[in-house]
Image (tube, coloured by chain):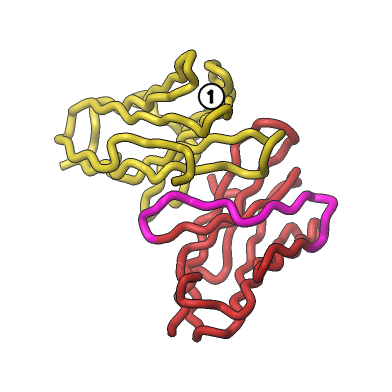
Chain colours: A red, B yellow
């Protein structure tokens, strides 16, 4: 079963614009992660935010986490055509080696 | 190259057959995870191994089995294949003490005809 649900399912923007994707989850988490997948390729880890963190940055990526609302957002600033991909949030429930549960993803298209 | 190697990249087989997918984790990673990705179900967790032992089980069918060998590579065996088993199968490995998140392989695309 899916733990996280991304919203929107698909997003199309112009190059240079910002892209915002949201993720909602159902139960308490240890941390939340975002991954990118180029068409038919393996997923690539982007960023991890722990349950006691509210915001994290990595380059053009900004992730927020609101545990009271059980939601997270991923912001990509100044998007580029190369950012075109599917983006997934993933959560785990406990500390240590437990499997991540992925949402169904947001498909982002950045038009040059 | 992510460091996680999956073979083969593509596999076409007939219904009722059995196939084996292979995964070599990133050097030093003890945990290996198998996921199935299909268009309608998204990315589904199948099974996790840690240092040769099964650690967690997800939505893995009884027709599927896996193991992790002493050299830490893992194999996923799919038997009595059905059309609905057609999907991308991903292997991932992790070492939370060294880096966050999972490292995924490039996947095996299985087509059952």
Q: In what quadrant of the picture does the C terminus of chain B appear?
A: top left
Point out the stretch of residues depicted in magenta.
Answer: A39-55
Nearer the observer, B98 or B77: B98
Residue at image position (63%, 44%) is: B101
Residue at image position (58%, 51%) is: A45
Disc count in the image? 1
Q: Can you tell which quarter of the image residue A60 is in?
A: bottom right
In the image, residue B24 sits, relative to residue B107, either above or below, namely above
Query: Residue under circle 1?
Result: B49
Q: Position of residue A41 (x, y in %)?
A: 39, 53
In the image, residue B99 sits, relative to residue B23, either above or below, namely below
- Residue lying at the far top of the rendered structure: B70
Kind of element beneath mark 1: strand
Q: Is residue B81 magenta?
A: no
Nearer the observer, A81 or B78: A81
Q: Is residue A62 left or right of residue B102?
A: right
Q: Mark 1 — on which chain does it sit?
A: B
- Residue lying at the far right of the rendered structure: A52
Q: Residues within 10 Å of mark 1 (few under 14, many from 20)?
A: many
Q: Can you tell which quarter of the image residue B64 is in?
A: top left
Q: Position of residue A16 (x, y in %)?
A: 56, 85
Q: Can you tell which quarter of the image residue B51 is in?
A: top right
Residue at image position (67%, 67%) is: A59
Q: Position of residue A75 (x, y in %)?
A: 65, 71
Q: Position of residue B81 (x, y in %)?
A: 24, 32
Q: Is residue A27 left or right of residue B105?
A: right
């Amino acid at each position: 079963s899916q733990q996280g649900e991304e919203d929107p399912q698909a997003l199309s923007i112009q190059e240079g614009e910002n892209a915002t994707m949201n993720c909602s989850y159902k139960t308490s988490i240890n941390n939340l992660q975002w991954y990118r997948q180029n068409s038919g390729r393996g997923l690539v880890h982007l960023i991890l935010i722990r349950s006691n963190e509210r915001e994290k940055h990595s380059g053009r990526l900004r992730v927020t986490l609101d545990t009271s609302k059980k939601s997270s957002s991923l912001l990509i600033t100044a998007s580029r055509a190369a950012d075109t991909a599917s983006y997934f949030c993933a959560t785990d429930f406990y500390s240590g080696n437990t499997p991540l549960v992925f949402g169904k993803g947001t498909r982002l298209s950045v038009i040059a | 190259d992510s460091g996680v190697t999956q073979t083969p990249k593509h596999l076409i087989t007939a219904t009722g057959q059995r196939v084996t997918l292979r995964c070599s984790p990133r050097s030093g990673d003890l945990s290996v995870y198998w996921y199935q990705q299909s268009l309608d179900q998204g990315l589904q967790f199948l099974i996790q191994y840690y240092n040769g032992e099964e650690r967690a089980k997800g939505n893995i069918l009884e027709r599927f089995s896996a193991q992790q060998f002493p050299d830490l590579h893992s194999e996923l065996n799919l038997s009595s294949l059905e059309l609905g088993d057609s999907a991308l199968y991903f292997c991932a490995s992790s070492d939370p003490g060294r880096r966050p998140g999972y490292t995924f392989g490039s996947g095996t695309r299985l087509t059952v005809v």
